């Protein structure tokens, strides 16, 4: 293992944007992780954990600290659980689970990134969140320099949220244990999946997990840019959650406003609908960055685009939503300065 200096980070993110890391290394084991964290502590520099780089926008100025590329691998099944190294690609785990006859992973197909990032973001799609599958998380506590096991409840999962976001930098995830349910039922309640399996529903037949995985991959491919071809981080913003009173008020102005009941008092609103139908921003371009033509939640960068161009376009969208609806939206993508 070696620690490199002044390494471009653009090559390690799906946005294909980012300046240099002051220090950079890849770790393949927990022993190596301890070694490089101690290096950062001696240098008194910040640490940035990099998985697949699919959910971050790194400043054009780079990162004045140590970037650790997580490369701890391994997938093993035991006693109804599956233990996975943080450096494994998320979709490789989904494929493993589906092919092994496990239920629950299929709706989270084709999401870029690594397993270690899944609990941090509590990734979700098509009616399923990673937190529904997670048993526990193993992490290095950088305050005590001890490895600990955090249960599902201790991770304090929320909508695109977790303990790891609120105690940023303290815990470095090295592996995750998931439920390996081999008996279950697929979830096709989400609108897009209901439409995809309309014939099966009419004939009262239920698709299996492999069919649902293939459906999710197809649906995502039809409305999201290929992150291997274009610079993108997928959905750039979170869907806003508002009070019932706020939603009722918005419905007076926008009668067709779709929604999901989050709780007895809170309503989740699809931000893509607001950006498309109210702000009319699909295809809006700012410099070398644009709003994707098929999904207004997604920003796409062209070759040579800068982080400043991305953030400038994001602020235009934030201001538009605020002006039209009074809602203050939040980024789903991590902005790294």
Image (tube, helix red, strand yellow):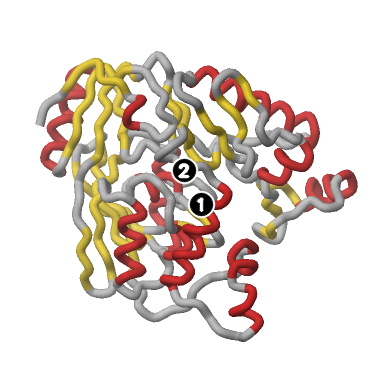
Relative horizontal placement of residue 319, taking residue 128 as reference (left or right)? right
The image shows residue 218 at horizontal and vertical percentages of: 51, 58
Assess disc 2: are there few (<14), some (14-19) or many (≥20) residues with their C-alpha within 10 Å of its C-alpha: some
Residue matched to label 2 = 226
State how far apart marks 2 and 1 are (Cα): 7 Å
* Count of numbered circles in the view: 2
Relative horizontal placement of residue 37, taking residue 297 as reference (left or right)? left
What's the residue at 62%, 43% (across, down)? 295
Relative horizontal placement of residue 254, taking residue 136 as reference (left or right)? right
The image shows residue 310 at horizontal and vertical percentages of: 54, 24
Quadrant of the rendered image containing residue 28: top left
Callout 1 secondary element: helix
Q: Are marks 2 and 1 in contact (CB under 8 Å)?
A: yes
Quadrant (top left/top right/bottom left/bottom right) for the C terminus: top left
What's the residue at 31%, 17% (across, down)? 20
What's the residue at 62%, 21% (across, down)? 286
Question: In front: 155, or 324?
Answer: 324
Q: Which mark is residue 259?
A: none
Quadrant of the rendered image containing residue 153: bottom left
Assess disc 1: are there few (<14), some (14-19) or many (≥20) residues with their C-alpha within 10 Å of its C-alpha: few
Question: In front: 34, or 251?
Answer: 251
Looking at the image, residue 52 lies above or below residue 191: above
Callout 2 secondary element: loop
The image shows residue 159 at horizontal and vertical percentages of: 54, 50
Q: Which mark is residue 221?
A: 1
Q: Of callouts 2 and 1, which one flags the residue occurring earlier in the amino acid sequence? A: 1
Quadrant (top left/top right/bottom left/bottom right) for the N terminus: top left
């Amino acid at each position: 293992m070696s620690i490199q200096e002044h390494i471009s980070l653009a090559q390690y993110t799906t946005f294909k944007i980012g300046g240099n890391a002051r220090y950079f290394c890849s770790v393949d084991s927990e022993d190596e992780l301890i070694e490089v964290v101690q290096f950062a502590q001696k240098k008194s520099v910040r640490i940035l954990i990099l998985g697949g780089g699919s959910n971050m926008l790194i400043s054009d100025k780079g990162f004045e600290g140590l970037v650790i590329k997580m490369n701890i691998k391994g997938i093993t099944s035991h006693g109804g659980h599956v233990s996975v190294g943080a450096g494994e690609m998320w979709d490789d785990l989904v494929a493993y689970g589906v092919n092994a006859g496990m239920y629950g992973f299929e709706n989270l197909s084709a999401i870029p990134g690594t397993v270690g990032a899944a609990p941090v973001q509590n990734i979700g799609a098509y009616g399923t969140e990673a937190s529904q599958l997670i048993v526990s998380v193993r992490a290095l506590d950088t305050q005590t320099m001890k490895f600990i096991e955090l249960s599902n409840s201790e991770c304090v999962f929320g909508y695109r949220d977790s303990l790891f976001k609120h105690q940023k930098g303290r815990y470095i995830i090295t592996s995750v244990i998931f439920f390996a349910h081999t008996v279950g039922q697929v979830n096709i309640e989400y609108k897009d999946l209901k439409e995809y399996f309309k014939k099966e529903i009419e004939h009262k037949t239920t698709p299996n997990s492999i069919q649902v995985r293939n459906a999710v991959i197809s649906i995502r491919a039809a409305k999201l840019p290929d992150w291997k071809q274009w610079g993108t981080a997928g959905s750039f913003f979170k869907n806003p959650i508002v009070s019932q009173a706020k939603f009722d008020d918005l419905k007076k102005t926008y009668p067709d406003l779709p929604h999901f009941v989050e709780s007895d008092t809170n309503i989740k609103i699809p931000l893509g609908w607001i950006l498309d139908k109210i702000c009319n921003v699909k295809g809006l371009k700012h410099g070398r960055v644009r709003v994707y033509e098929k999904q207004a939640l997604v920003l796409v960068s062209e070759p040579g685009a800068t982080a400043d161009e991305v953030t400038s376009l994001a602020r235009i969208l934030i201001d538009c939503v605020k002006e039209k609806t009074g809602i203050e939206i939040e980024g789903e993508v991590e902005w790294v300065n």
